[in-house]
Image (spheres, helix red, strand yellow):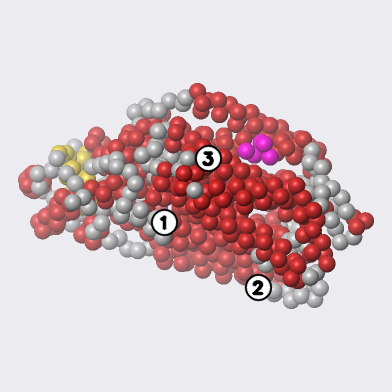
Amino acid sequence: MTDREPAHFATPAEVTDIVTGLVLVHRAGLRWKLAFGAAALLTALLVVAIVVLLVRGVGIWGVSMPVAWGFAIANYVWWIGIGMAGTFISAALYLTRQGWRSALNRFAEAMTVFALAVSSLFPIFHLGRPWFSYWLAPYPDRMGLWPQWRSALVWDFFAIGAYVIVSVIYFYVGLIPDLAAVRDRASSRGQQVFYGLLAIGWRGEARQWERHATLVKILAGLAVPLVFSVHSMVALDFSEGLLPGWHSTIFPPFFVAGALFSGAAMVIVLAVPLRKAYALEEFITDEHLDKLAKMMLAVGWVVTYGYAAEIFTAYVGGDPYDTALQRHRMQGAYAWLFWATIACNSLSIQALWWPRVRTSPLALVVIALLVLTGMWMERFMLIVTSLYRDFLPSSWGMFHPTVWDGAFLLGSIGLFALLFLIFVRLVPVLSIAELRRHAAERVDTRP
Amino acid sequence: MSVHGRLLQLHDAHELASAVDALHALGYTRLEAFSPYAVDGLMEKLGSPPKRIPPAMLTGGLIGGIGMLWLQYHAAAVDYPLNVGGRPAASWPAFMPSAVEVVILLAVVAGFVAFLVGSRLPTLYRPEFNVAWFEEASRDGFLLLIRADDPRWNDHQVAEDVAALEPLRHADVPS
């Protein structure tokens, strides 16, 4: 399937009516309401946890010496990684003219924006005094302070900042013609005003389309290096440190692969219920699931290569601290975490070699959930195992998560789900403009 | 009642393109074409707008990159030089990562602004919106507007020329 062979058989008018109807006509079902209620409860838990954190400080978490990075940083790296797949599907598959992405890119981009929103909470609240987080930004202040430009944490601040802003702009630019389509079909005054404001007066004029296409093309070209650089910066937060297990050149590509891996898994987890709830089987076909599964399998192997390369380089290098760390990971107190990670991220995906598994929504969701769990455990394992055995045995210690660590993790999942559930009710979940064009091309080229 | 122009709906993208050709042949120049997606080849007929987005993005990127490198040099070497293990104050390789991110950020912001300015967005009210079937342009309608400020504009002549194109429907757009 290429740009010239769209998957669906709807006409441009049908595409418009179906997708705008989901926003304007479709009523929320019981399952949506239940999911929304659960997500809202978890989000309330997150709010409570944040208030407690602001009042009592990061001491409510299990972080202490020597394990001073715990759940918060694992959550941050996990969520920002999940965001990658949206940018990848939107930008990289656009540049390589993969027409099938048009059924996925809208909700994948939304996933990116929401995952980034959730992700960026964690480094800020981890600062201890989050109300001073603006000190990371360079501005001529009265204290004469400047950021430490040689620190990977400052690079990361710029990387995430740029990524959040660019993702929102990219998402919105693609959305403008679709918002105009919803505006034009809206019947109630409230909807007309709401979508009218969001569509900022888009008319579908030929010169507007021309500028839109130019902008989208260059945005895609910039988003790809941006997303690779962002996950490399996240990795540099670790590898710029001198700790065994972190100080490794494999980290940037390893983190990019891990990000795409967890992101592809999240796209599957969102796509399957979405297409069932909205009866979008015509657009999000089994073939799409098959391609996502193949993407997950391929990049899962790159992640597995990363695990192997880390162990291999430790033993080839022969540094006693490096080899000791690898032994601690595989046999130490957190060995269960390491092997569970391998089981989820390297073993479970091998089922995807079978075409029947790749087109079975249930099997795919189960594997994708295993991968998401595995990727969180991997982030946590990488952080904790490098910290809990310090260079001096007298400084060794364990990490004991508290109930608030759990509240932040569950709450972040709740917030993400809440944002996504609001998104599917308010915004066209498929890219109407792109699917319309595919439909028209099919009509044009009909013999 | 003053008129903004005359709006007509054509059957499909091919007819829209031929209608543009026919009106050009008659001497009309101020035409606007509305379609549910970008129609290939239409832009060549209507005359491409000046390509301002790529130079705007280049400018934004250059300002971002040079500005960020200057800012880091100024902060680390001029305003607050700090000797950390004898490393040079102007350690430019460490300045690259932030600079790269800001290049992309400012290029994207500049491109977005150039897109909005070039497309005259946001403009929440447009005279075309007064025509009830203008909404077809965001579904599967191919619409063409002859603006009343066209030098060839003449109420009777326009009505005749439009009818000759045999559009699905046509109407005056009140301004």
Q: Is residue B119 left or right of residue A221?
A: left
Q: Are marks 1 and 2 in contact (CB under 8 Å)?
A: no
* Region of the chain picked out in magenta, as a range: A409-413
The quadrant holding residue B67 is bottom right
Is-magenta flag for residue A410?
yes
In terms of secondary structure, where does tag 3 sit? Answer: helix
Residue toward you, A44 or B19: A44
- Say which residue label 1 marks: A94
The percent position of residue A119, horizontal first and vertical second, equals 63, 47
The answer to which of A11 and A358 lies nearer the viewer is A358
Residue placed under numbered mark 2 in the picture: B93
Q: Is residue A299 visible?
A: yes
Residue that lies at the very extreme toward the top in this rendered image: A30
User: Can you give x and y, in whole percent of width and height, for residue A350 in the image?
Assistant: 56, 50
Q: Indicate yes or no whether the magenta region holds residue A100.
A: no
Q: Chain of mark 3?
A: A
Q: Looking at this view, is A27 or B174 the one in front?
A: A27
> In the visual, does B66 lie left or right of A155?
left
Q: Residues within 10 Å of mark 3 (few under 14, many from 20)?
A: some
Q: Which residue corresponds to mark 3?
A: A363
Q: Amino acid at mark 2?
A: Pro
